[in-house]
Image: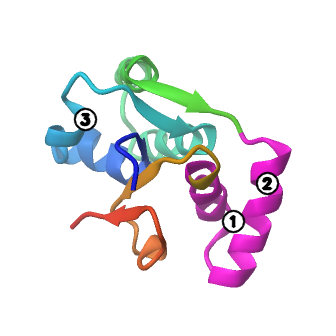
């Protein structure tokens, strides 16, 4: 497994809303993020009725802390295969394919990734 990490939206949400996972996020390490995780995080913050300024500040922090990775055609095709083979939701399979394509460990709290290589499920 690699030392470079892609942080799933579930981990970022736990960090932003429950003050968890500071040992992973609050250090000098540059983290990676799928652009789809950014979508999931902002959507969750909006659903939780967080103020626009607080959402902006949180998203800005994530962007400064992360290298945001786009969904490429190669990732999309790999994700389709993973979604069918592993029976995981589409967005999760895209995030996981992004981790694989970029040789990153996926840090998550989401059990959909349990048992997958390079996925670290935290409790």
* Residue depicted at 25% across the width and 35% down the height: 25
Closest to the camera, between mark 1 and mark 3, is 3
State the mark number for residue 25.
3
Callout 1: helix, strand or loop?
helix
| Mark nearer the viewer, 2 or 1 | 2
Q: Position of residue 68 (x, y in %)?
A: 56, 29
Q: Which residue range is magenta in the image? A: 71-99
Dot 2 alpha-carbon crowd within 10 angstroms: few under 14, some 14 to 19, many 20 or more: some
Mark 2 or 3, nearer chain start: 3
Residue assigned mark 2: 76
Q: Would you name the residue on which mark 1 appears? A: 90
Residue 83 falls inside the magenta stretch: yes
**Left or right of 80 on screen, residue 3:** left
Of pointers 2 and 1, the one earlier in the residue sequence: 2
Closer to us: 90 or 2 = 2
Q: In what element is the residue under mark 3?
A: helix
Residue in front for this viewpoint, 110 or 81: 81
Q: Residue at x 62, y 49 (%)?
A: 98
Please give the name of the residue rendered at 46% of the width and 47% of the height, measured from the top-left corner: 44
Residue 38: image location, x then y, percent? 54, 37
Across and down, in percent, residue 26 comes to 19, 29
């Amino acid at each position: 497994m690699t030392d470079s990490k892609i942080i799933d939206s579930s981990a970022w949400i736990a960090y932003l809303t429950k003050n968890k996972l500071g040992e992973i996020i609050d250090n000098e390490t540059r983290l990676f993020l799928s652009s789809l995780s950014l979508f999931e995080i902002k959507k969750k913050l909006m659903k939780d009725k967080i103020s626009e300024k607080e959402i902006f500040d949180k998203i800005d922090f994530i962007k400064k802390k992360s290298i945001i990775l786009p969904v490429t055609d190669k990732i999309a095709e790999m994700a389709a295969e993973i979604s069918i083979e592993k029976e995981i939701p589409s967005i999760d399979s895209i995030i996981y394919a992004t981790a694989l394509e970029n040789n990153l460990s996926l840090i998550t709290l989401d059990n959909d990734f349990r048992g997958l290589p390079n996925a670290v499920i935290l409790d």
